[in-house]
Image (cartoon, helix red, strand yellow):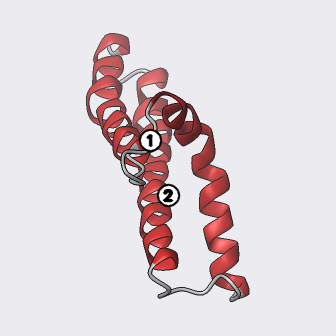
Amino acid sequence: MSLLASLLIYFVKPIITLFIMTVLISVIMSWLVAFNVINLRNPVARQIYEMCEVLTRPILNPIRRFLPGIGGLDLSPVIALLFLSWVNNFLIAELVDAVSP
């Protein structure tokens, strides 16, 4: 296995997986805040919520520009999760096959 293939498997895939988890956590926390299960006056909850928002904003905002909310429902996390899963499962595997001798 080449060095580039090893880097893709051991560093890029876990980073994308971590980003997928961050998007999921952000979605769940937004639901919990919307239904008043979590109060953002709690400093720990606010810090986690803001951290997830800051981390997911670079990928969700471009999607939100092209896909407006449908009846108040934000579908950008769904599109982002589908894209990230495709990159993680298909594209990384194809790149590993391409760089492996």
Q: In the image, which is nearer the foreground, mark 2 or mark 1?
A: 2
Residue 66, placed above or below residue 80: above
Q: Any mark on residue 22, and which?
A: 2
Residue 66 horizontal/vertical position (percent)? 48, 27
Residue 98 horizontal/vertical position (percent)? 32, 11
Q: Any mark on residue 88, and which?
A: none
Residue 18, placed above or below residue 38: above
Q: Secondary structure at mark 1?
A: helix
Q: Quadrant of the N terminus?
A: top left
The residue lying at 73 percent from left, 85 percent from top is: 43
Residue 76, placed above or below residue 2: below
Disc 2 crowd rating (10 Å Cα; few below 14, some 14-19, many 20+) is: some
Q: Which residue is mark 1?
A: 10
Q: Secondary structure at mark 2?
A: helix
The residue lying at 70 percent from left, 74 percent from top is: 47
Kind of residue sitting beneath label 1: Tyr
66 vs 98, nearest the viewer = 66
Residue 94, placed above or below residue 68: above
Count of numbered marks: 2
Looking at the image, residue 26 sits to the left or right of residue 89; the answer is: right
Task: In the displayed orientation, state which residue is furthest to the front.
Answer: 71
Kind of residue sitting beneath label 2: Thr
Disc 1 crowd rating (10 Å Cα; few below 14, some 14-19, many 20+) is: few
Looking at the image, residue 49 sits to the left or right of residue 41; the answer is: left
The answer to the question of whether label 2 and label 1 lie on touching residues, with beta carbons closer than 8 A, is no
The residue lying at 43 percent from left, 33 percent from top is: 67
Residue 69 horizontal/vertical position (percent)? 43, 44
The residue lying at 26 percent from left, 27 percent from top is: 90
Q: CA distance from mark 2 to mark 1?
A: 19 Å
Q: Earlier in the sequence, mark 2 or mark 1?
A: 1
68 vs 5, nearest the viewer = 68
Residue 62 horizontal/vertical position (percent)? 56, 31
